[in-house]
Amino acid sequence: MKELLEITNLTYQDLFDDISFQIDAGKFVTISGGNNCGKTTLIRILGGEILIPQTIKLLGMYIEEYPQNLWKEITGVIIPQDEMTFLFETVEEELNYTIQLFKKTEEDRKETYKEIIKKYKLTKYQKKNPNEVSDFIKIKIILAEKMLASPQILFLDDICVELDKKEQKEWINLLRTIQLETKISIIMTTSDLNIALESDYLYIIGEKGIILSGEPLSVIEKDNVLNKLGLELPFMVDLSVKLRDYNVVDKIELDIDRMVDNIWK
Amino acid sequence: MEVILENINEQDWEFSTILSSSDIIGITGPEYEELLDILTLKKLPSGTIKIDDVTVDNNNYLEYYKAISKVDKKIKKINYLNTVKELMNYIINYYHLQIKNIDKKEKDSLKIVGLKEDLLDRNITSLSRSEQKKIQIAISLLSNPDIIILDDPFRFLDMKSKKRIINVLKKLKEQFNKIIIIGTNDADILYQYTTKMLFVKNKRIFYEVETNEGYERVDYLKRNGYAVPNSVLFTYKAIKRKKVKINYQKDIRDMIKDIYKHI
């Protein structure tokens, strides 16, 4: 399969020193690391907001070679740290404005609106002012609008850290649903390795760039490296790894009940 | 230091409690933010408030209001203020803080939370979320407050930063007798770092308890919709389902040793 995203010899300030990696199409990839390792900066670079020429190729072509409007259509970038402001007074008007840019017939528009409200669980918020709802609702509105352009890739900067546990679950489920339907690729940074466990592939950023990568569980069990970076292992992974060192269990177990059964047979 | 709150009645809340500097106090529950707001004494609520035996009334309450610092969920952006230094200077002027050497005080407050002093000249919006959080905590210390109320203080912080901040808070409590109040719905954090818990519900203090004792009542918490820390849940299940005699442990290494002894 052709690589979707190809990063070659990326060097930027004192954050990244000559890093290269590829991301395959259709995957849900997470990128993690301690405070100030450059997660947000990396999203800004990959999303083309900070332009570093001759470094990042999307579908075989350098970012800077894309016409601006085409680039905006094939990628969706969400950075919750940046201001999230909306033009319209209600969520309904806000969404309908964006919908009419992409859907030609009245019937099509109505249908799309209904679908979005249902899929993004926005029923309760239709008449609310989008600038006054919670960050989670704002993020969902932004994602819904970006998805209307049918992008091929989403760049999401640590969104889960803004959410509570229940919202995190809903968010991950939403991303997975969207991915199933559209085959979109998702690149999301996260400071929480519990979230990384939900992805297909995980990169860990250390001092000068990527220091670990692979299937999430195989990366997260490297407790010494991760602790040194300031990352906290998910409790059940931490427990498994340490019990394995004592030869009490032989594999990582994420379910508490099964773990209890494994230890005390 | 001790704050006695008796028959407080404010914004439909009704409660009595004692907040003391011998505890790190945790507040959790769906409406915990409202209680944090009432505790900032922005407005004098009806009821009796005594701070170290002095009754707070309309004549002296501004003095106490100034002695309370709140660290909000997120940094508030004030339009014309750009750099960290500008924001700090603004706070110092706004609250008429009497500080001899402002420059030194500002640099020191950054050092306490683990930030470099060259951050003073950085634009606030250019900082990462963890840096912004630490700046907020540094600012809250500028006024040398007696009571520090923190809304979700560890969000955005990695393990290293969390440990540093909790050590700062512990030191303030132990050496300077400050009252530390942490509001959050993150059960793992509350279990790890607080010593007394206020579980709130329906605008009341529903359950006031020493932290360990409270979190070990797993059935009770679950029944009332509160989250239970993972480490507690594991130990609880081991005890209940396998009848093993392991103890509740906060440090995972102690937990491992305990499990090892009981297999």
Image (tube, rainbow, N blue to C red):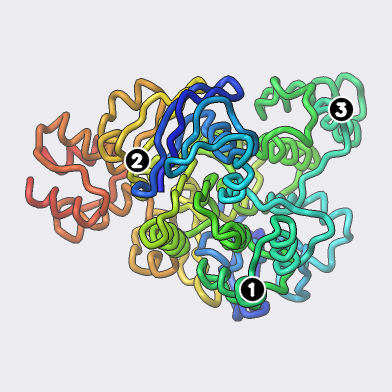
Residue B196's disc number = 2
Dot 3 falls on a residue whose secondary structure is helix
| Whole-number angstrom distance, CA of label 1 to CA of label 2 | 36 Å
Point out residue B54 in the picture as x, y percentages from the top left corner. Answer: 47, 41
| Whole-number angstrom distance, CA of label 3 to CA of label 1 | 54 Å
Placement of the N terminus of chain A among the 4 image quadrants: bottom right
Q: Chain of mark 3?
A: A
**Is B72 placed left or right of B217 in the picture?**
right
* Residue at x 35% of width, y 40% of height: B196
Q: Nearer the viewer, residue A134 or A50?
A: A134
Foreground disc of the pair 3, 2: 2
Give the quarter of the image for residue A140.
top right
Foreground disc of the pair 3, 1: 1
Q: Nearer the viewer, residue B95 or B73?
A: B95
What residue is pinned by disc 3?
A93
Amino acid beneath label 2: Lys
What residue is pinned by disc 1?
B100
Task: Please report whichever mark, 1 or 2, sits nearer to the chain's N-terminal start.
Answer: 1
* Residue at x 44% of width, y 56% of height: A215
Q: Chain of mark 1?
A: B
Point out residue B136 in the picture as x, y percentages from the top left corner. Answer: 61, 57
| Whole-number angstrom distance, CA of label 3 to CA of label 2 | 47 Å
Placement of the C terminus of chain A among the 4 image quadrants: top left
